[in-house]
Image (cartoon, helix red, strand yellow):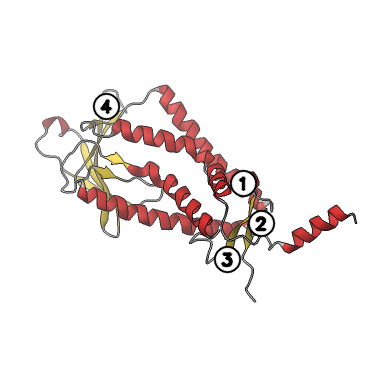
């Protein structure tokens, strides 16, 4: 065995083993729930403080709808109404009404969606902070991995992110931590940008019909959705094959199972 091969073999043996996909998935799920709960509490407080002027539509949500009645607006009487609410621990983060009615053509339906304030009254469209979900998650992971190489989700699953150039370093260098999160969430960047654009476009508009989008806007949104689905699948396949995913290879980092202290 050559000196180079001996050194490579010794280095591989020295590193703790890589975790499997399910352990990493569990850590990621815990981290996502931590951020989701924090965002729900933040948006719930803003919803109450702004009387429904801020709301949150997140990927994981609990939505309850029930039949409702609209009074005082004859033009809305032809719609069948439902009042929908998203809340966490009883704290509302979004309340809106959805009306459906027969369209001008046979078999066609028209719909209207109107945001409601905390008292259930119509109001101009609220600012939807759902686009902050992945931004908050990436920022949280960046800070935690800078500090210790471990997020809240990685601690119970005994995972640590290491700098491949300095195995015994606690936490990642800032440059590598930024690179790691940037590449990890690169596939989600288009949907974050389009989501924020749509949110600010709709913010403050008068109550009315469901907004119509151009063909270009629909194509861009669809492409962003496809990319945000493909990117994590590619990462998951790399992990399942026992390799470091693209963000670890790019940042020269690696995730390993934490060694037992003796």
Q: Residue at x 51, y 58 (%)?
A: 147
Q: Are marks 3 and 1 in contact (CB under 8 Å)?
A: no
Position of residue 112 in the picture relative to residue 162 (left or right)? left
Residue 35 percent location from the top left of the image: 41, 54
Give the distance between the C-alpha atoms of the residues marked 1 and 2, in whole angstroms: 13 Å
What is the residue that sits farthest to the bottom in this orientation? 262
Disc 1, SS: helix
Residue beneath disc 2: 166
Say which residue label 3 marks: 158
| Secondary-structure class at tag 3 | loop
Q: Is residue 7 above or below residue 238?
A: below
Q: Is residue 155 above or below residue 104?
A: below
Residue holding disc 1: 251
Whole-number angstrom distance, CA of label 1 to CA of label 4? 54 Å
Q: Which residue is mark 4?
A: 103
Tag 2 secondary structure: loop
Q: Is tag 1's residue or tag 4's residue first in the polypeptide sequence?
A: 4
Q: Residue at x 42, y 28 (%)?
A: 218
Q: Position of residue 184 (x, y in %)?
A: 55, 45
x, y (%) of residue 172?
Answer: 57, 54
Mark 1 surroundings within 10 Å by alpha-carbon count, few (fewer than 14), some (14 through 19), many (20 or more): many
When the figure is inspected, residue 216 is found, relative to residue 119, above or below; the finding is: above
Q: Report the Cα–Cα distance between label 4 and label 3.
A: 57 Å
For marks 2 and 3, the one nearer the N-term is: 3
Q: CA distance from mark 3 to mark 1?
A: 21 Å
The foreground one among 18 and 233 is: 18
Q: Is residue 130 above or below residue 24?
A: above
Q: Position of residue 210 (x, y in %)?
A: 29, 31
Q: Could you tell me which quadrant the C terminus lies in?
A: bottom right
């Amino acid at each position: 065995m050559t000196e180079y091969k001996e050194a490579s073999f010794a280095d591989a043996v020295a590193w703790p083993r890589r975790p499997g996909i399910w352990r990493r998935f569990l850590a990621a799920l815990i981290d996502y729930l931590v951020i989701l709960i924090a965002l729900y509490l933040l948006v719930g407080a803003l919803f109450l403080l702004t009387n429904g002027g801020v709301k949150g539509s997140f990927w994981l949500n609990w939505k309850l709808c029930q039949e409702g009645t609209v009074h005082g607006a004859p033009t809305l009487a032809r719609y069948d109404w439902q009042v929908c609410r998203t809340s966490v621990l009883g704290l509302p983060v979004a309340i809106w009404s959805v009306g459906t009615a027969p369209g001008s053509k046979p078999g066609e339906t028209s719909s209207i969606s109107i945001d409601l304030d905390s008292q259930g009254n119509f109001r101009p469209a609220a600012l939807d902070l759902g686009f902050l979900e992945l931004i908050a998650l990436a920022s949280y992971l960046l800070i935690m991995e800078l500090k210790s190489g471990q997020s809240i989700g990685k601690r119970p699953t005994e995972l640590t992110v290491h700098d491949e150039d300095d195995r015994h370093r606690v936490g990642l260098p800032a440059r590598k931590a930024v690179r790691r999160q940037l590449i990890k969430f690169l596939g989600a960047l288009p949907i974050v940008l389009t989501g924020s654009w749509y949110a600010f476009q709709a913010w403050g508009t008068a109550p009315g019909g469901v907004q119509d989008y151009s063909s270009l806007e629909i194509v861009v949104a669809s492409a962003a959705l496809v990319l945000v689905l493909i990117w994590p699948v590619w990462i998951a396949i790399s992990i399942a094959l026992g390799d470091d995913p693209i963000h670890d290879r790019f940042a020269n980092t690696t995730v390993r199972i934490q060694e037992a202290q003796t």
